[in-house]
Image (tube, rainbow, N blue to C red):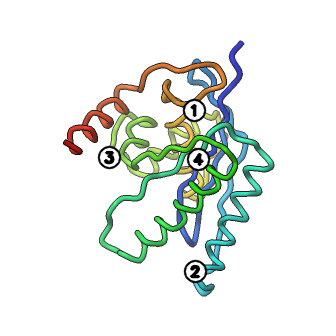
Amino acid sequence: MTPALRVLGIDPGLTRCGVGVVDVRADRSATLVHVSVVRSGADLPISERLALIAAGLREVIAAHRPHVVAVERVFAQQNRSTVMGTAQASGIALLLAAENGLPAATHTPSEVKAAITGYGSADKRQVQTMVARVLRLDALPQPADAADALAIALCHGWRRDAPTAGGTGALTPAQRAWADAERAARR
């Protein structure tokens, strides 16, 4: 039997950084290992906020020993300060992955939604509902940041080309379409 891939999913944010760890098996079934939110006060200096996020992520990595880290990719928004904070938290997550020798990947929000619900424009409630179903949870994961982190972890774990304890394979159709679109945009 192939061991499960343990994925740490991170929904980066300065005030609330969602963290979810799941074990994903080759048959795409998954088990919840850990879910939490790392918080930092908006009144703190940015350096302290980033240090709090780093400390929280270090604790999760040490306690749950993931095989891979998946982070939501920063996307353009109207609010520049929100984008900057998200990018800074994302950078902390990717740095910690590298420091721990863990492969890391980023996934766009629409890629995650498509992988989890089959629809790239799904709303938060639809994502939470599907995450709860996949992980066989009695209630919807709360807050939304935590549910998003679990969705990111599941999305990554379902990529059959993701680093695994047992091998490689192909992308899901939604992930393949997204990868094709990104390649075309770079040309």
In contact (CB < 8 Å): disc 2 and disc 3: no
Choose mark 4 or mark 1, whichever is in front: 4
**Residue ID at (56%, 41%):** 153
Tell me where residue 5 appears, x and y as whole percent: 65, 30
Q: Distance between the residues labelled 1 and 3?
A: 19 Å
Q: How far apart are marks 2 and 3 (CA)?
A: 32 Å
Q: How far apart are marks 2 and 1 (CA)?
A: 36 Å
Which quadrant, please, contains the N terminus? Answer: top right
Judged from the image, the secondary structure of the residue bearing numbered disc 1 is: helix
Tell me where residue 32 appears, x and y as whole percent: 69, 38
The residue that label 1 is drawn on is 134
Choose mark 2 or mark 1, whichever is in front: 2
Q: How far apart are marks 4 and 1 (CA)?
A: 15 Å
Which quadrant, please, contains the C terminus? Answer: top left
Among numbered discs 1 and 3, the one appearing first in the sequence: 3
Among numbered discs 3 and 4, the one appearing first in the sequence: 4
The residue that label 3 is drawn on is 121
